[in-house]
Amino acid sequence: MSGIDVAFSIYRNHIYDEHKIKLLTQHNLKIAGSVHSVIWELFGASLTGRSGTGTTGADLNGWEVKSAKLDGSYEYQYHLNSGLEKLHEDCKVNHLFCSYSETYKDVFVRAIHGSNLEHIFLSWENDLIKNYNSSTPADQRRQRFRKNISYGYVVKHGVPILTISNGEINFRDDLALNDLMRKS
């Protein structure tokens, strides 16, 4: 069974939960965002066959997993003690971008190697250093340094890996995924 097949099983059992979506709708509650980031990491782990690192670096060994509502941007957070190291690691690992519709019926998965995002990450470096510089007044420092990569950028530059439409696989590229696996 390929990583895409395993990930699709995670999707059907833990992301696209029709019963939960029906209940949320009945109670006029927000649907999008009801899947926790760790479930997207599980989806990514299943897709790539990689386990979590258990550290403050990339989510999985050789992979960073990001999720956002369709047309939304992907947030990166950098923390005080590990931020700069994480930013440099982001230049070297693969990035898995999962976009989802409000009901999770549609999911688009794209990947970009960190070397193709390096110019973005390095453009954040000075601001990250400044944010955590002890000479910067405390009221001007943020606890977490946050930046985003836009959905449009990912669509334009990302390698399509998987498309789920109306709850079913519509497109898959096992070869592209395997190629990225060799780079991680």
Image (spheres, rainbow, N blue to C red):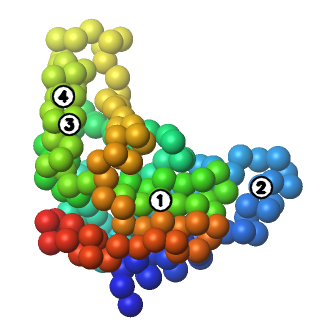
Q: Nearer the viewer, mark 1 or mark 2?
A: 1
Q: CA distance from mark 1 to mark 3?
A: 23 Å
- In the image, 72 versus 170, the foreground residue is 170
Please, what secondary structure does the residue beneath circle 3 have? helix
List the residue tagged with mark 4: 123
**Position of residue 80 measured from the top left corner of the image (x, y, whole percent):** 24, 33
Q: Residues within 10 Å of mark 3 (few under 14, many from 20)?
A: many
Is residue 84 shown left or right of residue 4?
A: left
Q: Residues within 10 Å of mark 2 (few under 14, many from 20)?
A: some
> Element type at marker 2?
helix
The circle drawn on residue 24 is 2
| Quadrant in the picture for residue 133 | top left
Quadrant location of the C terminus in the rendered image? bottom left
At label 3, which amino acid type do we have? Phe
Amino acid carrying label 2: it is Leu
User: Between marks 2 and 4, how big is the CA–CA gap?
Assistant: 40 Å
Whole-angstrom CA distance, mark 4 to mark 1, is: 27 Å
Q: Residue drawn 69% across and 51% down?
A: 31
Decide which of tag 1 and tag 3 comes sooner along the chain: 1
Q: Earlier in the sequence, mark 1 or mark 2?
A: 2
Q: Quadrant of residue 121?
A: top left
